[in-house]
Amino acid sequence: MRELSVGEVSRRAGVAVSALHFYERKGLIQSLRTAGNQRRYGSDVLRRIAVIRVAQRVGMPLEAVGKAFANLPSGRPPSRDDWAALSALWRDELEQRIAQLHNLKDRLTGCIGCGCLSLEACSLANPGDALAAGGDGPRRWAGE
């Protein structure tokens, strides 16, 4: 298999070098090191990066991508069948997200007037009234 430098992979995959390093730290892609300690990637990494980017575009967390990649054989690009299996794993989660977004879209207009989104029964900021046990008033810090 042909080995590619970080710069080659970055150009061909359309991602920043820092993204490659990040994906590698997360265990999504792997590199080898040369005697001079430079990273080299197998050409199969290009397809994996393409899958990562598609998954990110549809809102899949990188943790889910990593779990899915754990089921793929290493050393070869994911095939069409592999992609079918990966996308099937994500289908239910994507359906749930779509339902949540529809709910948000349908209810958001009614919340804009309140200005706080910390009401005891707010279905957007407090789904299922999970914060009510703590009493009235805001329960979250702005940084959360």
Image (cartoon, rainbow, N blue to C red):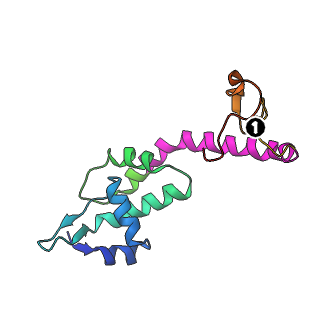
Give left or right: position of 13 versus 40. Answer: right
Amino acid of disc 1: Ser
Q: Observer-nearest residue: 46 or 20?
A: 20
**Where in the figure is residue 93, as x and y percent of width and height?**
55, 41
**Where in the figure is residue 89, as x and y percent of width and height?**
46, 42
Q: Residue at x 33, y 56 (%)?
A: 25
Q: Residue furthest top?
A: 133
In the figure, residue 21 lies in which quadrant? Answer: bottom left
**Where in the figure is residue 16, as x and y percent of width and height?**
42, 72
Residue 93 is covered by the magenta coloring: yes
- Under tag 1, what secondary structure? loop
Give left or right: position of 36 versus 115. Answer: left
Question: Mark 1 Cα within 10 Å, few/some/many (few <14, many 20+)?
Answer: some
Q: Residue at x 49, y 55 (%)?
A: 55
Q: Main secondary structure of the magenta part?
A: helix
Q: Which residue is mark 1?
A: 118
Give left or right: position of 4 versus 17. Answer: left
Q: Observer-nearest residue: 135 or 71?
A: 135
Residues rendered magenta in the picture:
84-113
In the figure, residue 4 lies in which quadrant? Answer: bottom left
Residue 126 is covered by the magenta coloring: no
Q: Residue furthest left?
A: 35
**Image quadrant occupied by the N terminus:** bottom left
In the figure, residue 104 lies in which quadrant? Answer: top right
**Where in the figure is residue 91, as x and y percent of width and height?**
54, 43
Q: Count the marks.
A: 1
Q: Residue at x 28, y 69 (%)?
A: 43
Q: Observer-nearest residue: 5 or 126?
A: 126
Give left or right: position of 96 versus 67. Answer: right
**Image quadrant occupied by the C terminus:** top right
